[in-house]
Amino acid sequence: MNDKLSVLLINPPIYDFTAFDFWLKPLGMLAVASKIADADFRMFDFLDRRHEFYKDKPQFKPVSTRCRAEVGSDDWGRGRFFSEAINKPDVLENVPRYYRRFGLPAEIFTDFLKTNKSCDFVFIQTVMTYWYLGYKEVIEAVKIHWPKSKIILGGPYTKICPEHARNLGADFIWGDIKNPQHKVGGFRLPLTNVRGSAPPMWGLYKNPETAAMKLTNGCPFKCTYCIVPIFEKGFTAKPLEEAIAEFKFLVSLGVKNIAFYDDALLYKSDEVIKPFLKYVIENKTKVNFHTPNALNARFIDKEIADLMVKAGFKSFYLGFESRAEDFQKQTGSKVFDNEFSDAVENLVGAGADKKSITAYLILGHPRFEIQDVEESMKFVNSLGVRVMLADFSPIPGTEDGKLCEKYVDMSEPLMHNKTAFPTILLGNDKVNRIKDMCRRLNRFEI
Ligand code: SF4
């Protein structure tokens, strides 16, 4: 008789106006799972674009091109999710966009639950607070078909909105589990045998081509719109041997694209990223690296730029937000425009293609008046690199989240939506005008 604990890991569907697979992987849940010994794991990832459901859908097939929303998938592991239009929640009624459910259809999951033996535990990865309708959908389906399974919800949503998460229907919130010996409903929570530094459980995917890594935790900055300094006290880094073992494991699985999920990947670079990249270069390992979480341009000196290009970084996303000095000073002084242009120069000097460099600029920040977004876009464009507007999502608990209370009901997570908030703050016409300008600049027409 098999008396091992059984655990199902679930990456839920997304309910939103837009969603794109920008290297979206449930790294946190896979890392937690790796700490649990002697359990049988299964995985259901609604956002897995390599699922056989996509096989007869040519519009989602990989094409050899760079990231463009109108194509199915690109050669760096990004692409479109299958999606269905659904009714907008009442609170978002005034946002003039279609609302959709992204990810594998619910029937595939129902079928999975019906045809598989139930697990003792079901872990659900959460990310954005305003995606909770997807988490709710999964909880409800599990409760119907596997009523005895204990559901554990973890991830950013549960940390940012713990009370809301506690009322969503799961049995536990990961952050509430203080004592791994604690018994609930006859089960002992499965953290009794920590495996030490085992890498995240990427082996649960069949032939994964894309994965994510995190070498560090925390960030030395305190940007007023960001939750990282509130949840991660201090800055820590994974020991080099552990980072290399994790990397080698991913390579052994056939992973071709690795996205770094670090918040401050380049901080303390002599101790963290430089030795790691030197290992990659010396071992001639062919993997494409990406930085969707934004790099801090301040730290991109000539040596780092050179190591990154040589090690195989193919895309460089730099957090810039605004060139306006007042805005930078009032929001945390993350980076200034001279530092940004130096970083671009260093990357290009090291051999990076200008088109692979993108600056994130916030759109719809409550200090919009001093942000000078149009000027900032023109500045980025003048350096020959791309602009990506990052729609602002207000986060409760942050200074800027507080500023947003006068515009939206922050106790309703759907109102943190990144499409909704800029539209509510600036109006649809203005948002469209700025987005059009961004598109034109990226085509280098201005
Ligand atoms: S630098 Fe980035 S991660 Fe750090 S606090 Fe600012 S926005 Fe957050």
Image: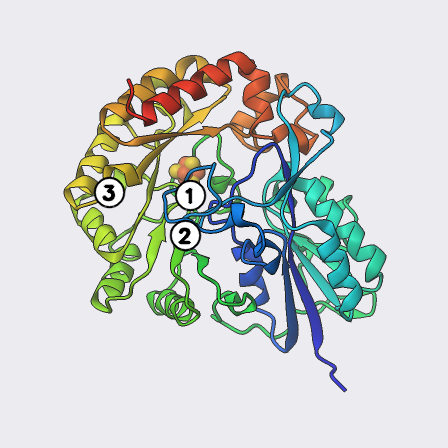
Q: Quadrant of the N terminus?
A: bottom right
Mark with earlier residue (1, 3): 1
In the depicted structure, whether residue 246 falls above or below residue 172:
below
SS at badge 2:
strand
Q: Quadrant of the C terminus?
A: top left
Q: Quadrant of ligand 1?
A: top left
Q: Residue furthest bottom?
A: 1
Q: Which residue is mark 2?
A: 259
SS at badge 3:
loop
Q: Residue at x 73, y 50 (%)?
A: 106
Q: Which residue is mark 1?
A: 293
Mark with earlier residue (3, 2): 2
> Mark 1: which amino acid?
Asn
From the top left corner, tell me how far across and down residue 256 is, in percent. Answer: 38, 60
From the top left corner, tell me how far across and down residue 332 is, in percent. Answer: 39, 29
From the top left corner, tell me how far across and down residue 40 is, in percent. Answer: 66, 74
From the top left corner, tell me how far across and down residue 248 is, in percent. Answer: 37, 70
SS at badge 1:
loop
Tags 1 and 2 in contact by the CB under 8 Å rule? yes
Q: Which residue is mark 3?
A: 300
Tags 3 and 2 in contact by the CB under 8 Å rule? no
- Which one is in front, 173 or 43? 43
Q: Ligand 1: does it lie within 8 Å of the C-beta at label 2?
A: no
> Mark 2: which amino acid?
Ala
> Mark 3: which amino acid?
Ile
Q: Ligand 1: does it lie within 8 Å of the C-beta at label 1?
A: yes
Left or right relative to 3: residue 46? left
- Which one is in front, 375 or 221? 375
The CA span between labels 1 and 2 is: 9 Å
Total labels: the figure holds: 3
Q: Residues within 10 Å of mark 3 (few under 14, many from 20)?
A: many
